[in-house]
Image (spheres, rainbow, N blue to C red):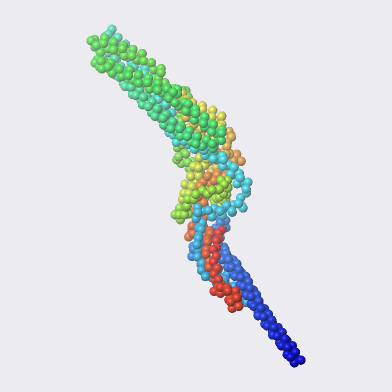
Amino acid sequence: MYLSHLKQKNSYMKKSVACLKLKSSMTIYITLVLVVIMALIFTLIESGRVSAVNTKLRSITYMAADSVFAEFAQPLFDQYGVLMLWADEDEFMKAFNGYIKENLDMKETEAGSDMDLYGMRYADSALTEVKWVTDDGGELFAKQIYDYMKVHVIESAMEELLSRTDFFEQTEKVREVMGAISEYQSEFIKVEKSVSELSDKVNHIKDISENPKTLLEEMQRDLDLYQNEGDQEAAKRFSENRTELKKSNDEIQGELSSVQEKTEEYYQNVDAAKGGLLAMKEELELSKEEYAPEIYEAIQNKVSEIEDTGSEEGEGYQTIKSNAETAAAFQQTIKGFDAFFEATEGEVSEENAGTYQTLTGQALESIKSFDLSSLNAGSVEAEAESADLSFIENVNQKYKTGLLDLLAKEISEKQIDQSSFPSLTSKEKTTEEEGDFVDKTVQKALFAEYNVEHFGCYTDKKENTALDYEVEYVLGGKDNDRDNLSSVATKLVLIRSGANLINLLLDSTKQAEIRELAAAVSFGQVYIMKIAELLITTVWALAEAMLDTKALFEGKKIPLMKQQGDWFLSLEGLKNFTGDEATESDEKFGLGYEDYLRVLLLLEKKENQRYRTMDMIQANMCLNENADFRIKDCMVKVKADVQYSAPSVFAALPIVRRTALLDTSGYQFHFTQEYAY
């Protein structure tokens, strides 16, 4: 029994020990599990905290940059709708770091708590990139304007402006081609002038060519009287007529020599004029595909007509050549009188009277036998007497000198100092970017509209501005109103002359008038007539363009393509052009001065337009706000590197540190912040 009891007790003790061991193992297991769970929980909390710190620091960095850029130049924004930060790099960084540190202060944000679980600390910062307004060809400045104008401009207005670009491109091409002729205008006029002078010389020779014959006949009669009646007065008259004959012959020889000289000049002038024709033809062929078919055909016909009549086989050329040959032959005949004058040098006497009679008869026969009917410059006397091309020089002279005073009244004399302007100190040449041409044209149209909307011009001046003609400055870039307006006037005249040329070339009625006047000044020379048609066409277009520009300056509207009743200047009026002609117009649907400014801005290089716009903004800010303002010192974009630190909090607990093996030295945060208007 005892042994049985001991066995039972021993078995119970074993079971108790086993139970105790099991309980101890469970306690240790549970403890280990709890430690792992706590480490996991604190690790997750630390991870969440680090993520929150990262997000908060990113937000703080952005808010600091945003806060600095919120200090933009307010007057600039109010007047011109653009955002710029007038500050240098040190000023920016001082303000930027100040906002960072202010936002890092958690005492106010963590109300009622002394514990800062974030523990964020500013470490360092650096400005790695700054974009000033004038950088990259003013691209960021232009982008602001594009975005601003998209909201303010009616889309249909832009479409209408862009729809005109094809027409103005046509006018530019026509003007370039006709301009090739204009460059040789003086040579063409010299051709006309040389033929005119030849005509005068030939007609004069014809007038005086009868003098030798008349004098010789009188001299024969005088010799008859002397021989038959012994009339001493007749002998005396013979000597006097001989003297007059010599004078007449000298005069004729001089005129004949002049004919040959003028003929040579004619050849040279024709060759020079052909150079202008060739230049015109080459210019036409180079841009053939860019012309409307009817315009190309009209110009091509003009060129072909001149080519066909300007060859050496042409009638006009042959007429001049024949004149030279006739003049040379007649000159030899006249020179033959030298022997006659030498042989009849002495006074008339009974001994020499017979000899003198024979010599005089021979001289008379030589004169009578020479036919001057082939000597002809093709003069159309009835018409040529009252017609010439002098009005061409008159119009060109007015265009080249004193154009502005002729077209505009009460011109501003304001002047500015450009020495600090972006267009002179900061202008960069940029390469044209790849992209859709239409989009770029739309951008230029938006920029053009911005200038017309925000700046004054000749017909719509604004108050308190450095220059009265601000849009004209954007187009001209000169330091004074007068020169800028003059530049615009010249550009407007060129644009309108191109449009008028197209109109004239396609108007059969006006072409008929031009042909009639050209015939009147051509002296029967077809070559000159065809050249004259071109010259008259170009100068009529130019004179009309000058009056068009004058009307625009007066606030009137001019249609792109004029109808018969829209022209200010008739062809008859062209001959007496003064520039003071009336420019009455009832046109209500054409383009006004500001519309043409928009077109000119579209044609202006984008770099010029951007930087000169900056010039005007700076000039007006200096005038009205702060004389030290410089647009090149304004930021529009920055990139900054910022470093922060934060300590480990939950990861620093011994239980977590030992279990999770986390870095307890703290965390470093690095951000690159970009900000742009």
Q: From this viewpoint, which residue is outermost toward the right?
A: 1
Looking at the image, residue 75 lies above or below residue 606 = below
Quadrant in which the C terminus appears: bottom right
Q: In the rendering, at what x and y percent does residue 302 appear?
A: 50, 30
Residue pictured at 64% horizontal, 74% vertical = 41
Front in this rendered view, residue 493 or 126: 126
Residue pictured at 49% horizontal, 50% vertical = 430
Q: In the rendering, at what x and y percent does residue 327 appear?
A: 36, 21
Left or right: 3, with 414 as reference point: right
Quadrant in which the N terminus appears: bottom right
Residue pictured at 40% horizontal, 21% vertical = 322
Task: Report if residue 147 is visible in the image.
Answer: yes
Q: From this viewpoint, which residue is outermost toward the left?
A: 351
Residue pictured at 49% horizontal, 59% vertical = 633
Count of marks placed on residues: 0
Residue 401 location, quadrant? top left
Q: In the rendering, at what x and y percent does residue 523 appear?
A: 45, 25
Left or right: 455, with 238 as reference point: right
Q: In the rendering, at what x and y percent does residue 146 appear?
A: 57, 52
Residue 226 location, quadrant? top left
